[in-house]
Amino acid sequence: MTSASIRAGAGALGLPAADVDSVVSGSLAADAVLMGLPFDAGVTGVPGQRHGPEIFRKLSPGHDWSVTHDGALGGLIDPLTGGPVLAGRRVFDLGDLGAVPIDPRVGRAAYYRALTGLTERLAGVGTIPLFVGGDHSLSAPVATGLAAVHGPVRVVCFDAHCDFSIRPMPALTDITHGDFLGHLLGAGVVAGAELYGVRTYLPASCGPLPPALRCAYAYGFPEPADHVDDTDDLDEPHDEPTYLSVDLDVIDPTEFPATGHPEAGGYRLRELLAAVEHVCRTRRVVAVDIVEALQDDRENRATSATISALVMSCLRALLDDHQGRARGR
C-alpha cells in the first residue's frame, strides 16, 4: 500500500501524483518531479502555449508502473535492452502551477515570483524538476531560482531562435520569451549559455553577442559541432550545474507544427532525443524545461506524444541506474 500522500497512477505517463508541499518540505523524497506551467503571458506573437501541460497530461501514454509505499517505481522493462525502466526511482507529478485558464488577476510578476520561489525550494531538497510549459519566458524565473541554490548555472538550450537582446531588462517582468537570455546573462544568473538548433537571424543592434553566449545548429552528437574547441570532449562528464531547456520549435515543423514560431530546416525528433539524452548523461543537469507547445486541435495527440518522448528520455538518461553510475550519482 502506498503512502496517503502518493496517488499511484494519477499523474502524466501513469506516474504517481503527489502534493508540492510534501516534496518541498522534505517529507516525501523525490529524485525528480514533473510540473506544468500553464502560462503564456510572455509571448509576443501567437498565444496558446498555456495549454501545453494540459495536452501533455490528457493524452500522454499511461504506463503500467508499480509503486511501493514510499513511491519507488517498478513494473516496466525496456524491450530493446531487457533492463528495467526507472526501477527504484521516485518520480512524482506535482500538477500545475496555476490552472487553465489562468486567473486574470495573476500577473506576470506574481507568477514569475511564485515560480522562482518554487524552483528554489525544489532545488534545495535535491530533486530535479522537469517543467512543461508554457512559453519560453518561464525559463528566466526557473534559472533565477536554481541560481539561488547552485550559484550561476549553465544553460544548454535547444531552440530555433537565439532569444537574446541587449535592450534594458532590469527585472524579470521586462522580459519576453524571445529575449530572456539577455536578462539572465546581465543579472549574473547564468554563467554561460549554449544554444543549439538556431537557424534565424538577429537585428544587427543585438551584436556582437557576448562570449558567454554560443550559438550553433548541430549539438555535436552524433556529428561534431563546429564551435567546439579541440580540447573539448562532449563525452566527458561536466560538474557545472546545468539547466536544460527545450523549445519545441527546434523541431522541424514538418514533424512538429504545433508551436507559435515554426522555422523550416529544424531537427528531426530522433536527433533531438539523442541530443537531450546526451546532455542528461554527461552534464550535472539540475532542471529541465520543455516549452512552446501550442494548442492545435489537429495536432494535440502528436504534441503529447512528442512531449512524452522527451520527458521519458530525460528521466531515463538522468535517473536510470546504469546511466547514474556512469555520472557518479
Image (tube, rainbow, N blue to C red):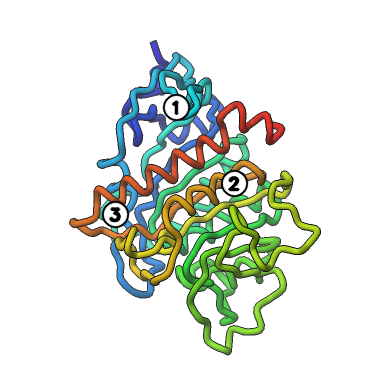
Residue type indicated by callout 3: His
**Circle 3: element type:** helix
Callout in the foreground (2, 3)? 2
Q: Nearer the viewer, residue 276 or 95?
A: 276
Residue type indicated by callout 2: His
Query: Where, by quadrant of the figure, is residue 280 drawn?
Result: top right
Q: Which residue is mark 2?
A: 278
Q: Nearer the viewer, residue 274 or 18?
A: 274
- CA separation in Å, label 2 and label 1: 18 Å
Residue type indicated by callout 1: Asp
Question: Sequence-wise, which precedes: disc 2 or disc 1?
Answer: 1
Where residue 213 appears, as percent x and y from the top left, is 65, 69
Callout in the foreground (3, 1)? 1
* Residue 285 in sight here: yes
Residue positioned 32% across, 63% down in the render: 254
Query: Where, by quadrant of the figure, is residue 78 drawn?
Result: top left
Question: Sequence-wise, which precedes: disc 3 or disc 1?
Answer: 3
- CA separation in Å, label 3 and label 1: 30 Å
Q: Which residue is mark 3?
A: 51
Crowdedness near tag 2: few (<14), some (14–19) or many (≥20) residues, C-alpha within 10 Å:
many
Crowdedness near tag 3: few (<14), some (14–19) or many (≥20) residues, C-alpha within 10 Å:
many
Question: Which label belongs to residue 78?
Answer: 1
Residue positioned 59% across, 46% down in the render: 278
